[in-house]
Amino acid sequence: MERDIAVYSYDGELLQWIDLKRFRRLSECDRLARVVKARSGRIKRVTLRHMPGEWKPSLLSDYQGTKVLLSSVPRRWTSVLPVARAGRRPQ
């Protein structure tokens, strides 16, 4: 079987690609929050349900006012963070 179904976490992060057998197993366990199908009826992607005890995603506002290493911040946020110039204090 081909792994042609994309699985996303509840916050929209791509986790893995699965086959139809694994999709059926997830749907039987009631782990799916949303299923997206193509016009032909094939399942293209699924989003997992947020389960109790799972961590919530980090937000940029969680890091506001703190000294953060850029290596610890997700790559998609680095374009938003202010960059301090060498020799100047950030304002």
Image (cartoon, rainbow, N blue to C red):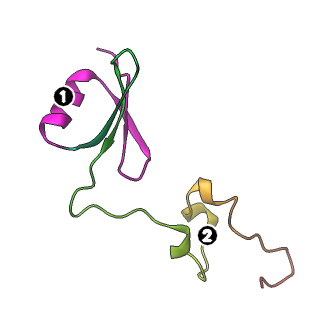
In magenta, the rendered stretch is: 1-30
- Residue 21 on the magenta segment: yes
Of residue 2 and residue 49, the one placed in the foreground of this image is 49
Q: Distance between the residues labelled 2 and 1?
A: 41 Å
CA neighbours of label 2 inside 10 A, class few (<14), some (14 to 19), many (20+): few
Q: Quadrant of residue 24?
A: top left
Q: Element under label 1?
A: helix
Q: Position of residue 47 (x, y in %)?
A: 34, 42
- Label 2 or label 1, whichever lies nearer to me, is 1
- Crowding at dot 1, Cα within 10 Å, few <14 / some 14-19 / many 20+, comes out as few
- Residue at image x 22%, y 64%? 53
Direction from residue 28 to residue 62 in the image, left or right: right
The answer to which quarter of the image holds residue 7 is top left
The type of residue carrying mark 1 is: Arg
Q: Mark 2 points at which residue?
A: 69
On screen, residue 76 above or below 63 = above
Q: Residue at x 29, y 45 (%)?
A: 48
Q: Residue at x 34, y 16 (%)?
A: 2
Q: Decide which of 24, 84 is in the foreground and name it.
A: 24
Where in the figure is residue 88, as x and y percent of width and height?
Answer: 85, 82
Q: Classify the position of the C terminus by image quarter.
A: bottom right
Residue 23 on the magenta segment: yes
Q: Looking at the picture, does residue 76 appear above or below residue 60?
A: above
Residue drawn 76% across the image and 69% down it: 83
Where is residue 60 shown, x and y percent of the image? 55, 68
Q: Is mark 2 on a helix, strand or loop?
A: loop
Contact check, label 2 and label 1, Cβ < 8 Å? no
Give the labeled residue for mark 1: 24
Q: In this view, does 64 lie above or below 55?
A: below
